[in-house]
Image: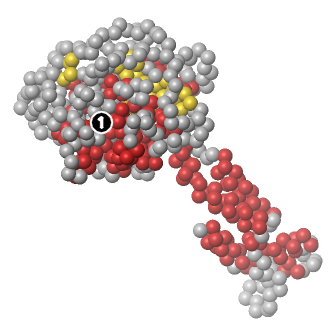
Amino acid sequence: MPLFFLLSCQVGLTQSDSFRGVSPHTPQGSTAPLTPYWRNEHCFSNQQRSRLKQREHGFFWQPRHVAACLFLFLGVLMLPFTANAQSIPSLLLFVGNSYTYGNDPQALNQQTIAMLREFLPPQTTTHQERIAYGGYLWEQHLADLQNTQTIKPLRQLLLESQDPLHRWQWVVFQEQSQIPGIPETDPYAQRSTAAIQQLAATVHTRNARSILLMTWGRRDGDSQNKTLFPDFKTMQARLRDGYLRYRTRASTPQYTVYIAPAGIAWEHLYDDIKRNGQDPLRPESLWYRLYDADGSHPSLLGTFLAAATLTAALTGRDPRSLTYNPSPNILEAERKQLLQAAYQAVFQNTLPFPFPWASASEPNQEPTPESPHESEPTQTNTEPASPDASIESTTSETPHESEPTQTNTETPHESASSESSIESPLESVHSEISTESSTEQPPQDALPSDTNSTPNAQGCCAAHPTASLDLPTLLLLLFGLIFFLRRFAYGV
C-alpha cells in the first residue's frame, strides 16, 4: 500500500505539463520541439532552476519526500485504532443490588474495571464506584436520586459531586432479578420501566451513557413463581424480552440505552454444554457452577462471565484476548470457555439492539409481546425495606491483573434492615417475588471526600472524554503535512 501511494504521487507529478518542460509562453498548438524552460538563464535563478530540475526528474524519490509520504500514510492508517483506544471507558458507576456486589472484593464492578485496564493505555486513570443495596429495585434507586431531605449516595455521586473522577462515562444499571420477566401490565413492571426512563434521562443530562446489565434466569427456575419461571430457559427468555422492552422504552431520539447481555452469555454456555451431549444441570458442569449455592446469585465464575460480557459490550473488543483471572482456582480451560460464551453473546447474537461501538445505529424495535396470562394483576401496597448500601471505589494509574485496592471509612447511613420479600402482585400464580438475599451484607463504605478536588467550570457535568489523537499519530500527521506544504509552497 505505501508503494502504491508513492507510485501514484510520482505518476501524477511526472505527467503534469509544467513538470515536462512546457513553458508558460509556448503558443497553443505549437509543434516546435520543447525545451525545458528551467534552462533559460534569463528567466530563473540557479536555485529556481535546481528546484525545477528536481521536479522534472521526480522529486518524490528523494529520501526526505519518501519519508514525508510514509509519515502521512502511517498517520492516516493509525487513525481508526487511535479512536478505538480512546473510546474505551475508564470512569464507571454501577447501580444495582446483590447481583452487583456479590463476591466482593471481586464483584462485578471490580472485575469489569480490571478487564477494561487491559484495553487502556498504561497511564490511564480508571475509577469505578458501586451503589448496590441488597434486594433493591430501580424505583428505589430513583427515589434515592430524587431525595433532597437526606444524604443519598446515588444523588451525591450522580448529581452533586464536583470530583473530576465522578464525571462518569457510563452508568451500569442492574434490576431485581425477577421483575424484568413479569408481564408488562404488572404494576411492578410498570414502575420499573418508568424508573429506568427517568434514571437514563438523568444520566444523559450528566453527559454520560446508560447500559443495562441483562441478568440470567435462575438455575432451576423460580420455585415461588413456577407458572412464569418453570426452568432456566423459560425464565431467561422472559428476562431477555423484558430488557429489550426496557431499552425500547428508555431510549429516545436524543440518546440510546444499551444492553450488556450477560444472561444470553449464560444461555450460550448452557446450550453449548447440551450440544456436547452433557447435562448442564449436573453439579460438576461449568454452567451449574456459575451459580452460588442458592441457584440465583452468581458465583465467582458467574461474576467473571458477567464482567467479560459487559466489557465486550462496552468496548467492542474480543473478550477472548483477556488475560485477567480473578482466582488461581479457575482453570485456564474453563476461563477460556467462559470468555467464548461472552464473545458469542455480544458478537454472534441476533437480537434487535445495537452496541455503542457499532458503526450504524439501529432503530428501536419492540420485543415479541408476551402471551396473555389468565388474570389481570393487581397492585399491592407492600413496600420493600431499605437495605444497607455498599459503595466502593478504585483509582489506578497502571494496568494490572490484581484486584483494585479499597479505601473504606465508616460512615452513618440509614438504619439497616434485613433482607425482605416483596409481596407478589401476580394473582395468577399466587406466589411472591423474593428479593435477592445474601449471607453477608457488604460493608458500608463512605463516599470519597470532594473537599480537596478542584473541578473545572463545568463541574460534574463535564462531558466524558471523546475520541482524540494521541501524540505519536499527531506527530506523524504533522511531519507529513509539513513536508507537503513545503513542497507545494516552495518546491522543496
Judge whether 340 appears above or below 69 on screen. Answer: above
Residue 317: % across, % down: 45, 47
Q: Residue at x 61, y 46 (%)?
A: 469
Q: Residue at x 59, y 58 (%)?
A: 77
Q: Secondary structure at mark 1?
A: helix
Residue 290 in view here:
yes
How crowded pointer 1 is (Cα within 10 Å; few <14, some 14-19, many 20+) is rated as: many
Q: Which residue is mark 1?
A: 290
Of 72 and 330, nearer the camera is 330
Of 250 and 337, nearer the camera is 337
Judge whether 19 appears above or below 205 on screen. Answer: below
Q: Residue at x 48, y 39 (%)?
A: 116
Q: Quadrant of the N terminus?
A: bottom right
- Can you tell which quarter of the image residue 256 is in? top left
Judge whether 376 appears above or below 1 on screen. Answer: above
Residue 91 in view here:
no
Residue 93: % across, % down: 44, 28
- The number of callouts visible is 1
In this picture, residue 468 sits left or right of residue 392: right
Of 290 and 488, nearer the camera is 290
Of 202 and 294, nearer the camera is 294
Amino acid at the residue labelled 1:
Leu
Residue 382: % across, % down: 19, 14
Q: Residue at x 54, y 53 (%)?
A: 80
Q: Quadrant of the C terminus?
A: bottom right
Residue 390: % across, % down: 40, 19
Q: How is the image coloured?
A: secondary structure
